[in-house]
Amino acid sequence: MNAWRVAVRTSVGVVRSSNQDAHWSNDSLVVVADGMGGHAAGEVASAIAVSTIAEAFAGDQSSEGLRRAVVLCNDRILKDAELNPERHGMGTTAVALGLVSAPDGLLPVIANLGDSRAYQIRDGAIRLITADHSVAEEWFRQGRISAQEAAVHPRRHQLTRALGIAQTPDVDLFPMAVQPTDIILLCSDGLTNEVSETEIIDIVEAAESLEDAASELVSRAEANGGRDNITVALVEILGPMSQPLATSPAAVTSAATPPPRARTRRVTWRLGAALAALGAVLAGAVVVLGWYANSSYYLAADGAYVAVYRGQPHGLLWFAPTEIMTTDFLAAQLRPADVTALGNDIVEPSLAAAIHYAGYLHSAWLMSQFSTPSTPAG
Ligand code: MG
């Protein structure tokens, strides 16, 4: 039995004359790429991306294999642009979902570079897994502009990371915690610029089938303007999967690690039935409380360095926070307001997000050393 089912739809949209998005899917890999560059070069870049990732990942189905597959695309795109000067400057985003071999089964891992996205959908809730590598999004993470400003900012399409730009691309990897019936959405920005997360979840929930949901998402993006190429890949998880190791320093867990469901099923005996039921409720409450206490990751100083702790800052009842790892960032190399917030206010939903955020705080400090933040120009 396959581990997942995939439905993919793509459209040129209603404004553009060609579709520079590309996609690929089989029973262990799904890729969406959004190419850019004039004279059809974007189409070449995205096509190189999907074919290279497919070929390379087939030869090494590990997390590192997935990362290397994306890096290999970069080499091939740069080489192609060198050989074909008319394609100079072409690039592409890539978001790939690979099933990698783990000791106890298969683990879904997302690799991302650029502003195509991956979402996880479960029980009527949607969660963004990837972080956009765009100027506006990075300014938002640095606190220079608000989320609302970032969503409509003219530089939201200007990428800070993509394939075909740098010699050594910095690929984000997100091991995912999934369960059967979860849906993972990979898409180009032609969907997310036109269709809100609320609309996405409404469409997926209302659809009769995965295929209908994918078609309807593309139709809605067209109806809302269709100003860009639109590609949607919906992946429904069919069987149990391996789970990421949340406490391993090497494991960057996804932001989409949903709460474990606490369900207590106990043998009750007639006389003690009421008492047992009450006990079960209390036990459930303790499990839920324990989950809540440990569901967050926050940044605090450990000696000279910024460290990531799991738990609630200052603890919750008898659940004390635990240190997960020390980052490479010195607390002294953060802005004063961020230093004050350490140990108190910087709470993130996952280890990956916390590490990511520590990096951004450090970048923000670096920028403050070399430049005065100015009002972003268009
Ligand atoms: Mg696009």
Image (spheres, helix red, strand yellow):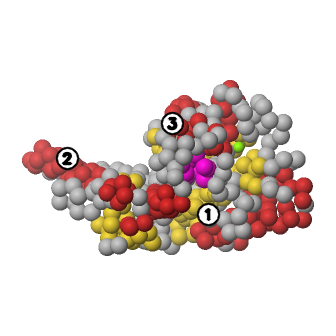
Q: Is 140 situated left or right of 23 in this image?
A: left
Q: Name the amino acid type tagged 1.
A: Val
Q: Tell me the CA gap for discs 2 and 3.
A: 41 Å
The residue mark sitting in front, 1 or 3, is 3
Q: Tell me the CA gap for discs 1 and 2.
A: 44 Å
> Magenta stretch?
131-140
Q: Position of residue 323 (x, y in %)?
A: 32, 68
Q: How many discs mark residues in the rendered view?
A: 3
The response on whether ligand 1 sits within 8 Å of label 3 is no
The residue mark sitting in front, 2 or 3, is 3
Q: Position of residue 290 (x, y in %)?
A: 26, 56
Label 2: which residue?
A: 281
Q: Residue at x 80, y 56 (%)?
A: 89
* SS of the residue under disc 3: helix
**Quarter of the figure that contains the C terminus:** top right
- Disc 1, disc 3: CB below 8 Å? no
Nearer the N terminus, badge 1 or badge 3?
3
The response on whether ligand 1 sits within 8 Å of label 1 is no
Q: Residue at x 80, y 42 (%)?
A: 19
Q: Is 127 situated left or right of 160 in this image?
A: left
Nearer the N terminus, badge 1 or badge 2?
1
Q: Would residue 279 be visible to someone looking at this image?
A: yes
Crowd class of label 1 (few under 14; some 14 to 19; many from 20; radius 10 Å): many
Q: Position of residue 285 (x, y in %)?
A: 22, 49
| Circle on res. 148 | 3
Residue 135 belongs to magenta span:
yes
Q: Would residue 260 be visible to someone looking at this image?
A: no
Label 1: which residue?
A: 171
Q: Position of residue 234 (x, y in %)?
A: 62, 45
Residue 235 belongs to magenta span:
no
Q: Tell me the CA gap for discs 1 and 3.
A: 26 Å
